[in-house]
Image (cartoon, grey):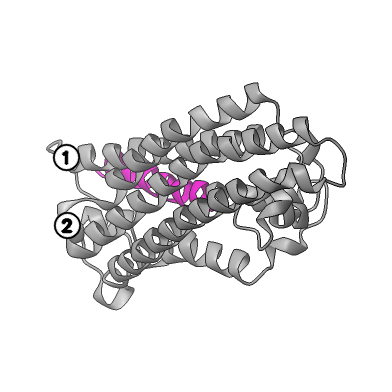
Amino acid sequence: GSTGIICLSIWAGLCGMAGASLMLIADVLLYGSDCHGQPASVYFDSVDPSTKDPYLLLTSPMASSVHVTTGGIIGPVSGLLYVIGGAGVLLRPEHGAPGVAAALGHCLATIGAACYHTAFVYTALISAAYQAICPGDVPTADCRGGFEDLVASHAAYMGHLKRIIKLGSIVSTVGLFSLCASHWPSAARRSVGASLLPWWVVVFAPGPWLLAVRETGLLRALPAPCGLVVAGGSFNICFFVFFLVVTLRAARSRRRTRIKRAPNGRKSIAKDT
């Protein structure tokens, strides 16, 4: 019944929040203690594999092998939780084609992010191997030769993953905007779907926020000590907020459903948009 649909949305939202939290923990593990307390510019200059100068990856500080491996393993687990959360919230019959587009885009973006986390392990391994062979801040020509080609290829691969994540985010955002537009007050449908994803949910859509703060360079200005962690974890922070809002909305609808009971025991859904 309607209560079951609301409960499903609550559990899906909780899964999405868990996925975002786990992947944020993985971020912290992957970057290592040397990166903690750094400004966001350090992330974009040396930690991010899509940097304009891939060679900087060879000399960037990385976490220990244990932390890196753990962070890489957490990535696919959090990706699965992300997919369950997005499908449970967005992929419902009453959402129609916009819901399908939003769910598919979400899955593409979060699976891409999980793959990115797994592949980032090799970023750390390549950097560690290079620094073991060529210690010091000034590399010799002999050391740089083979590693330079390797890290350039690796950075190109990571760049492809980032483009997949962006594509999924755009598709998901378009679907979510279309879905929420149908719930605009003047055209809102009095249904459970409309009550759980009202028009104002677009304000918390992760895609526009990520494009705004990352592509415009606003994140780069974040200072220490939390700048690097916030910049690297911005994807998961935005998704956590989105799933939190959806979960709270569903919980509120469930509470109103319980309160508004007809005298004969039948439930009536609150028409709230």
Q: Residue, x 27% and y 42% (percent of image)?
A: 6
Tell me, for residue 263, which label it has, or none: 1
Q: Residue, x 28% and y 43% (percent of image)?
A: 88
Q: Mark 2 points at which residue?
A: 94
Examine the rendered structure and indicate whether residue 116 appears above or below residue 217.
above
Which amino acid, by three-letter code, is at mark 1?
Pro
Q: Is residue 120 left or right of residue 42?
A: left
- Residue placed furthest toward the top: 66
Magenta segment range? 238-261
Q: Can residue 37 be seen in this view?
A: yes
Q: Where is residue 247 in the image (x, y as percent from the top left)?
A: 41, 44
Crowding at dot 2, Cα within 10 Å, few <14 / some 14-19 / many 20+, comes out as some
The answer to whether marks 1 and 2 mark residues whose Cβ atoms lie closer than 8 Å is no
Q: Residue, x 21% and y 59% (percent of image)?
A: 95
Q: Is residue 103 left or right of residue 109?
A: left
Decide whether the magenta segment is chiefly helix, strand or loop: helix
